[in-house]
Image (cartoon, rainbow, N blue to C red):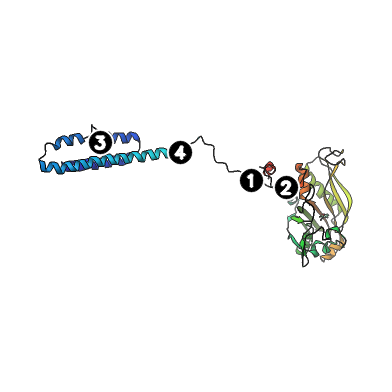
C-alpha cells in the first residue's frame, strides 16, 4: 500500500506541474485532495492493516496528504500572482508620451538659406568665431575709424583676437584656401557689444556669400539675389537694390524685398516704406583682392551678407529678436514639424 501512496504522490506532482489555469487547479485538487479523491479510500483501507504496518503507512499517508495540500496552496498563490501581473497591463491607459523636439527657428531659416544657395551651386564653408583683427577688419579694408572697430562695439580678446563681428572674414579665409572660380555660402555666429533689446542681440547669426570668377558683374549679383529672395519669401516678392557703402565692396548695395503685408504700398509693418531690408551686398573691392594676393584686373566677384535673425523675424512675423534666445517652450513649439 505504501507503494500505491508514493505513486499517488508522483501522479499528483506530474499533473500539478501541468496546471496553467484555475480550472486545471480545481480539477487536480478534486482528484487528489477532495472527498472524491483516493485519500478517504486509503484511510478506509488503513483500518484493515495490522497495527505495526498501520502506524508506518498511516504516518506516510498523513505526510502525503499534508504535502498535497501545501503544494496546492503554493500553486494557487502562484496563479494569483500571475493574474495580478496580467491585470496590471491596462490597455486603456494613455500611452507614455515622448515629446518630440523641434528645430530652432534660426536653424530652420539658416538651413533653408543654405539649401537655396546649394541648389545654385554654392558650397558651404565655415570659419572660426574667434577671429584675428587682421581678418575681421584690415584684410576687409575696414578703416580704423569704422564703428565696429571701437572697443564699445566688439568683444576684444587681446593678442590681436576678437569674437568676429560678422562672417565676412571667412571671405578672406576662403580666398586664401581656394582657387577661383568658386561660389561659397558661409553660415555662422557673430558677436557685437550691442544692448539686448527688441532688435539687437550681442550674439546673432549671419550667412555670407562669395562668388569669385573672371567677369563677375553686378548683373550676376542681382540675378542670384533675386532668385534667392523669391525662393525664400515667395514668388510675388519684388527685390530692390539701393546704393550703399561697405568698405569691402565697390559698388555696394543694400537689398530690400517688397513688404509681404502691403505689397509695397506702405503699412505699419514696414514702417510705411513698402520695403524691408534683408542684406548688404556688392562687388568685391579691388583692395580686398589685393590683400589675398589676387589680381583685381583679372578676377572679379560679388559678396553679400545677411542677418539670420532679421530674415527669420520677417519670414515668421516675429516682433522681438529676444524671443529667439529666451528658450520659451511655448514659442519654440510653434516650429514643431518644420525642417
Ligand atoms: N559684413 C556686413 C555686416 O556685418 C554685411 C555685408 C555687407 C556682407 C556687404 C557682405 C557685403 O559680404 O558684401 O554688416
In depth, the one of 128 and 230 nearer the eye is: 128
**Which residue was labeled with disc 1?**
101
4 vs 1, front mark: 4
**Residue 184, position as x, y percentages in the image:** 76, 56
Secondary structure state at the residue bearing disc 2:
helix
User: Which mark is on residue 33?
Assistant: 3
Question: Looking at the image, how many numbered discs can be counted on the residues?
Answer: 4
User: Who comes first in sequence, dot 3 or dot 4?
Assistant: 3
x, y (%) of residue 115?
Answer: 72, 49
Residue indicated by mark 4: 88
Determine the secondary structure under disc 4: helix
- Residue 298 at least partly seen: no
Q: CA distance from mark 2 to mark 4?
A: 45 Å
Q: At which x and y percent is residue 5? A: 19, 41
Crowdedness of circle 2 by 10 Å Cα count: few (<14), some, many (20+)?
some
Ligand 1 is found in the corner quadrant, namely bottom right
Give left or right: position of 239 versus 111: right
**In which quadrant of the rendered view does residue 258 lie?**
top right
Place residue 21 in its image quadrant.
top left
Disc assigned to residue 14: none
The Cα–Cα distance between marks 3 and 4, rounded to whole angstroms, is 32 Å
Residue 100 vs residue 200, the one in the foreground: 200
Question: Nearer the observer, disc 1 or disc 2?
Answer: 2
Q: Residues within 10 Å of mark 1 (few under 14, many from 20)?
A: few
Contact between marks 1 and 2 (CB within 8 A): the answer is: no
Task: Looking at the image, tell me whether mark 4 or mark 1 is earlier in sequence order.
Answer: 4
Q: Nearer the viewer, residue 180 or 249?
A: 249
Q: Secondary structure at mark 1?
A: loop
Instruction: State the CA–CA distance, disc 4 to disc 1.
Output: 31 Å
Q: Earlier in the sequence, mark 2 or mark 4?
A: 4
Amino acid at each position: 500500500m505504501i507503494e500505491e501512496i508514493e505513486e499517488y504522490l508522483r501522479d499528483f506532482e506530474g499533473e500539478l506541474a501541468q496546471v496553467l489555469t484555475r480550472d486545471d487547479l480545481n480539477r487536480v485538487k478534486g482528484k487528489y485532495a477532495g472527498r472524491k479523491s483516493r485519500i478517504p479510500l486509503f484511510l478506509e483501507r488503513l483500518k484493515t492493516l495490522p497495527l505495526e504496518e498501520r502506524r508506518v503507512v498511516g504516518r506516510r499517508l498523513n505526510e502525503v496528504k499534508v504535502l498535497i495540500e501545501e503544494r496546492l496552496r503554493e500553486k494557487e498563490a502562484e496563479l494569483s500572482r500571475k493574474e495580478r501581473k496580467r491585470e496590471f497591463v491596462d490597455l486603456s491607459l494613455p500611452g507614455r508620451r515622448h515629446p518630440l523636439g523641434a528645430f530652432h527657428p534660426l536653424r530652420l531659416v539658416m538651413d533653408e538659406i543654405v539649401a537655396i544657395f546649394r541648389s545654385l551651386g554654392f558650397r558651404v564653408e565655415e570659419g572660426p568665431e574667434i577671429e584675428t583683427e587682421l581678418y575681421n577688419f584690415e584684410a576687409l579694408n575696414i578703416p580704423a575709424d569704422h564703428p565696429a572697430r571701437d572697443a564699445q562695439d566688439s568683444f576684444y580678446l587681446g593678442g590681436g583676437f576678437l569674437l568676429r563681428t560678422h562672417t565676412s572674414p571667412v571671405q578672406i579665409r576662403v580666398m586664401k584656401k581656394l582657387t577661383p572660380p568658386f561660389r561659397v555660402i558661409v553660415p555662422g555666429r557673430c558677436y557685437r557689444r550691442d544692448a539686448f533689446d527688441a532688435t539687437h542681440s550681442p550674439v546673432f547669426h549671419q550667412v555670407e556669400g562669395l562668388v569669385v570668377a573672371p567677369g563677375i558683374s553686378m548683373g550676376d549679383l542681382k540675378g542670384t539675389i533675386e532668385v534667392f529672395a523669391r525662393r525664400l519669401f515667395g514668388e510675388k516678392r519684388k527685390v530692390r537694390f539701393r546704393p550703399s557703402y561697405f568698405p569691402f565692396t565697390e559698388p555696394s548695395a543694400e537689398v530690400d524685398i517688397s513688404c509681404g503685408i502691403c505689397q509695397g504700398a506702405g503699412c505699419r509693418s514696414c514702417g510705411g516704406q513698402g520695403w524691408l531690408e534683408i542684406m548688404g551686398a556688392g562687388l568685391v573691392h579691388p583692395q580686398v583682392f589685393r590683400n589675398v594676393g589676387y589680381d583685381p584686373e583679372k578676377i572679379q566677384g560679388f559678396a553679400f551678407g545677411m542677418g539670420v535673425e532679421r530674415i527669420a523675424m520677417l519670414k515668421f512675423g516675429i516682433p522681438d529678436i529676444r524671443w529667439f534666445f529666451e528658450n520659451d517652450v511655448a514659442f519654440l513649439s510653434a516650429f514643431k514639424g518644420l525642417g
